[in-house]
Amino acid sequence: MKGYVQDIESIAVKNEDFRQVLYTARNCQLVVMALKPKEEIGAEVHKLDQFFRVEEGSGEAVLDGIRTAISAGFAVVVPAGTNHNIINTGSVPLKLYTLYAPPNHRDGVVHHTRADAEADNEHFDGETTEYRVECAPGGEYFAGALHEINEDDALFDFNHPLESQPLKFEAKIIGIL
């Protein structure tokens, strides 16, 4: 399916990873995060805009030194160039999702802990979640999301009439858009 349509509140609340990139488009990226009690994202400045939405827990948003209490339902918009941090001040995990515009992280990256994130010097590499697949030479194209790839096969999600049925096919990459 082209785009991303899911229950983001439920996904964010169930998430236990510090950071998990769910979807990367050319101009924006959706990421869920979970901060342990007293944990923070860490003060940072981006050359991009960022949006946070808190789904569970409580904390503080710090934008250019101004601290504001946040809790479930709060949104935080961080314009490019703003020194910012999100801090969990509560006793339970702070669950949130964030949108980067444009993307900031490598598509599909998962950092289980903040230490994992700090140790991984990854950045957006231009690869997005979506791929186009031609079903037959000269045939129809379907947008799909690549969910998993290994040595022998790949798992795609297509918005197609046969989407609930397993299909096996050979694929040849002829180009990347």
Image (tube, helix red, strand yellow):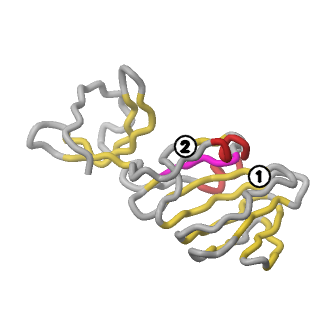
Q: Residue at x 56, y 74 (%)?
A: 80
Which span of residues is magenta-colored? 18-23
Classed neighbour count for the residue bearing mark 2: other residues with Cα under 10 Å, few (<14), some (14–19), many (≥20)? some
Q: Nearer the viewer, residue 138 or 173?
A: 173
Which label was assigned to residue 109? 2
Q: Secondary structure at mark 1?
A: strand
Badge 2 amino acid: Val
Residue located 36% across and 53% down the image: 2
Residue 41, image x, y percentages: 73, 57
Q: Residue furthest right?
A: 91
Q: Which residue lies at the image location 72% right of the left edge and 75% below the top edge?
A: 63
Q: Magenta stretch: dominant SS? A: strand
| Identity, as a three-letter code, of the amino acid under mark 1 | Leu
Where does the image place residue 96, in percent across and percent down from the top left? 69, 58
Residue 134 vertical position relative to residue 86 in the rendered view, above or below: above
At horizontal 24% and vertical 30% (from top left) the residue drawn is: 171
Residue 15 location in percent, x, y?
68, 45
Picture layout, residue 111 above or below residue 165: below
Specify whether residue 19 is painted magenta.
yes
The numbered dot on residue 35 is 1
Determine the residue located farthest toward the left in the rendered image: 138
In three-dimensional space, the C-alpha distance between marks 1 and 2, rounded to whole angstroms, equals: 17 Å
Splitting the image into 4 quarters, where does residue 76 fall?
bottom right
Q: Which sits in the foreground, 38 or 81? A: 81
- Report the side of 132 relative to 137 (left or right): right
